[in-house]
Image: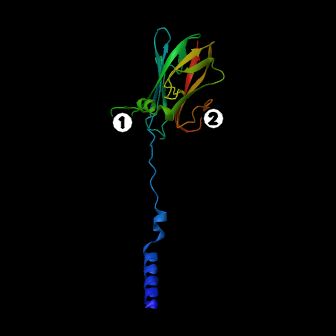
Amino acid sequence: MKNFKFITITILSLFLATSCSDDDDNITIPVPVNEEELITTVNVTLTPNGGGTAITFQMQDLDGDGPNNPVFTYPGGLTNAVLDAGVTYNGEIQLLNETEDPAEDITEEVEEEDDEHQFFYTASSSLDLTTEYANFDGDNNPLGTEFTVTTGAASTGTLTFTLRHEPTKPNTGLSDADGETDVEVAFSIEIQ
């Protein structure tokens, strides 16, 4: 009888060992993906503080990473945006996905997910202007879809707008922000 119990226990153990394989170790649980939106168009509008005519300039890249170069449009058909010296401008950035019909306003999503986004503004060393943030996330860290530009003396150069997704906040600027770049556009600026 003892042998029967031993044999029965051994057979049951072997059965359980073979029926419980380690295949479950190879199962991966999908990680939710926050798919980045396609940004085809960046519109920047600068309005002189205290009133005046707004200046809007645009970068449009309808094929994204395709072979076509982005198209830059400036007021008056110029090759740059012309700003007056010694003026503070209130700025707004609008992001669009124009592959959708009607065009999808990505700016709304960026502002809703303000803790996961931040714009950075970088002026070339030849351009005499300063920028400041005008809107912030829920933790009072910069967001930057709204900003101010204060121009100095006559000069020319570029003003680059960089949107980072999931940057380190707070940060001291683009150099330690980390995150992924959603869009980066350098506009030609002339201060007169």
Residue at position x 56%, y 11% in the image: 87
- Per the rendering, the mark at residue 62 is none
Find residue 88 and report its horizontal and vertical position in percent: 55, 13
Q: Residue at image x 45%, y 32%?
A: 110
> Hey, what amino acid is under mark 1?
Glu
Q: Residues within 10 Å of mark 1 (few under 14, many from 20)?
A: few
At a point 42% along the width and 85% down the height, the residue shown is 8
Q: Earlier in the sequence, mark 2 or mark 1?
A: 1
Pointer 1: what residue? 100
In the rendered image, the quadrant that contains the N terminus is: bottom left
Q: Position of residue 143 (x, y in %)?
A: 51, 28
Q: Residue at x 49, y 8 (%)?
A: 50
- Would you identify the image quadrant in which residue 95 lies? top left
How far apart marks 2 and 1 lie (CA) works out to 34 Å
Q: Looking at this view, is 171 or 119 the one in front? A: 171
**Residue 185 in sight in this render:** no
Residue 139 vs residue 12, the one in the foreground: 12
Q: Residue furthest front?
A: 1
Query: Is residue 170 in view?
Result: yes
Position of residue 45 measured from the top left corner of the image (x, y, whole percent): 47, 20
Along the horizontal axis of the image, is 84 left or right of 75?
Answer: right
- Which secondary structure lies at badge 1? loop
Specify the label residue 176 is tagged with. 2
Which amino acid type is marked by label 2?
Answer: Asp
